[in-house]
Structure formats: structure tokens, C-alpha cells
Image (cartoon, helix red, strand yellow):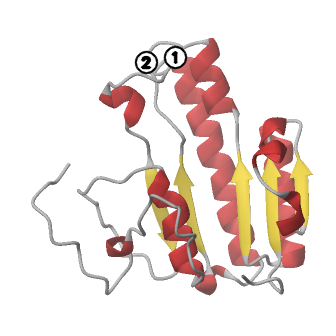
Amino acid sequence: QRPDWEVGSIYHWGGFKDLYDGRFVDHDAHGRTEEETAALAVDYIKTEKPAFLFVHFDNVDHVGHADGHGTPHYYEAVETADRLIGDIRRAVNEAGIADDTVILVTSDHGGVGKGHGGETLAELEIPWILYGAGVRPNAHLDLPISTFDTAATVAWLLGVDAPYAWLGRPIRSAMAGEAAPVQTYRT
């Protein structure tokens, strides 16, 4: 919808390149490590100031499958991802685009033991964190959020139309000035 926008994808897991149509990405980079992935993202943010950037860190998922979700090694991987997200946030500030940027941190699944795919809350619940321009400060959303809602929220924040086939809905109440949905179900 916006061919004039600079759009990037930087990822640690090489398989991400096969999950989207590369014709719609101006910058496509694969880091061999999470640290290299973060460095690629920091450099790209500072030089290109993209309108949209997807960054993927794989080690939390990898450690969850190799050593187990909720293990000490798993939480070490979470701490590393948190530090690298901090590097990206600083790059956004240094690039001078913080007033126009929202950072969304999420996961595709939770886990139990070394697996996932079941119906337990530990497997279904994921972090979903928004930070930046226009985000309601210190808000805790007590409504159900689906992984499908991530793309719908990003499209809404960017002011582009979501494809009709999408199942998700934008989580508008995360933003300052937006009303919470009328509903009785809370998480």
C-alpha cells in the first residue's frame, strides 16, 4: 500500500526469509547470532530510519525446545533478548525517530517442557508488549489478545488497510485516547 516506505526484515532464524514475499521488503538481512541480528537492526535503523522493521531473535525459542521452557537457561535467553531490544530502542532514539515509533515485542507461542502446541495456558499465552509513541503509559490490558491481533494492530498503527482475510483485530485500547472495547470477558 505504501511502496515509498522503507521496509526491513532482519532475523536470526534463517527460515523467516521463506515466510514472506521478499518483493515487498527493501532490506532483508539474516544475522548468524542474536547479537549480530541486533547489530544489523541498529545499523539499519540509524542509516535508513525505516517506516516498518521486523526483527526476530530466535534464542528464547531455541532454548525452550532444547533445554525446556522456564529453565534457568531459558530465562538467561530472555534476559539477552531484553538487552538486545534495549539496544534497538536506543538506536530508535539516536536515529531521532522515537516520536514516530512504536515497538511491539511478542512471541508466537509459549511452552511446556521442551514443546508446545497443546491447549494449556502456558503454551497459548504469550507476551504482548507495546512501547513508544502514543502508547498508553503503564497500561495493563486485561482483554484477550490473539497472535492474529499483532499484524492487525501493526497495520492499524501504520494507517494501512488490513486484508479482508485476516482474522485479527487491532488492539486500539493499548493507545492513549482509545476506548476499551465493550465486553464482559476479561483475562
Q: Is residue 112 left or right of residue 31?
A: left
Report, in whole angstroms, how far the alpha carbon at label 2 lies from the one at label 1. 6 Å
Residue underneath mark 2: 112
Mark number, residue 115: 1
Mark number, residue 68: none
Residue 83, position as x, y percentages in the image: 64, 47
Front-most of residues 176 and 153: 153
Three-letter code for the amino acid on which mark 1 is drawn:
Gly
* Residue positioned 67% across, 24% down in the render: 62
Quarter of the figure with residue 102:
bottom right
* Residue positioned 65% across, 38% down in the render: 80
- Please tell me whether residue 122 is drawn above or below residue 4 in the rendered image: above
Quarter of the figure with residue 41:
bottom right
Residue 20, position as x, y percentages in the image: 77, 53
Q: Secondary structure at mark 2?
A: loop
Three-letter code for the amino acid on which mark 2 is drawn:
Val
Extreme residue in the left direction: 184
Front-most of residues 159 and 80: 159
Q: Is residue 85 visible?
A: yes
Q: Is residue 181 left or right of residue 122?
A: left
- Please tell me whether residue 79 is drawn above or below residue 73 in the rendered image: below
Q: Secondary structure at mark 1?
A: loop
